[in-house]
Image (tube, rainbow, N blue to C red):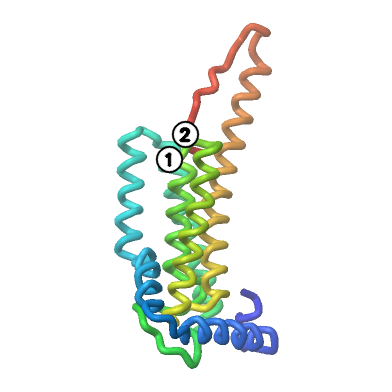
Amino acid sequence: IAMFGGRWRGPAVTLTVVDDTIVRWLSEVSIPGYMGVMRGVAAVAWLPLITAGLWALVIALLALRRLRHLVVFLVAWLIGGLVFNLTLFAVRRPRPFGVTIRGDWLGWALPSLAMTTLVALAVGVLYTLVPEGRWRNTGKWVAAGVLGLVAVGRMSLGIEAPTDVLVGVAIGVTVVIAMASAITGINQSVTNILESAGPKTFFVQRYWSGGI
């Protein structure tokens, strides 16, 4: 990100050339039906669809009375939005050069708005609704596969470059998991304090929680 701040210099130019070369290569694949498939997978990151998913998650958490999970996710979403906007206006990176853009786009390219929000939503669902353990681990692999396909689809359409996608993914994942870890650490500390303060026979019920 620091490379793109202010006037572009050697490293920023080199990275942009590499990014645009990858996007150009993906957008010029001539396999029959390829572009149609790419349009289909890229549509998963359609912003109205992501917005609907966000509201569905909020309603699900309210219905399940997981208010702590809801608060953590919404705070993480707001902080992620702040980090996104600060990065966006600090970098002001344009869309890939020399490539026909075949899809809808909005604003500057880095970080990718669609990938940032889609990743944050996916991580939020995994950490608030999916039980920790086997199911969550499986969900992570599935989400990684889907997100990878979506990223390739958006690059094939010339909408974004690899760096735009990677920075967006990093923001979406880091902010949500950091907030989840902070809350988990606080809960663990409180439980340990109660157990150590009580008599030897005192037992603190550790309720099973399917989320954070």
The quadrant of the rendering that contains the N terminus is bottom right
Q: Could you tell me if residue 134 is visible in this image?
A: yes
Q: Amino acid at mark 1?
A: Leu
Kindly state the secondary structure of the residue where label 2 is placed.
Answer: loop
**Which residue corresponds to the image point at 55% horizontal and 85% vertical from the top-left?**
20
**Residue 102 sits in quarter:** bottom left
The reply to whether the C-beta atoms of the residues labelled 2 and 1 are less than 8 Å apart is: yes
Residue 75 coordinates in the image, percent (x, y): 46, 49
Q: Which residue is mark 2?
A: 210
Give the residue displayed 48% in from the left and 51% down from the top. 123
Residue 106 visible? The answer is no
- Left-right relation of 123 to 42: right
Q: Nearer the viewer, residue 149 or 116?
A: 149
Rate crowding at label 2 as few (under 14), some (14 to 19) or many (20 or more) other CA atoms within 10 Å.
some
- The image's mark for residue 129 is 1
At 34% from the left edge and 46% from the top edge, which residue is drawn?
A: 58
Query: Which percent across, then down, holds residue 13?
Result: 63, 88
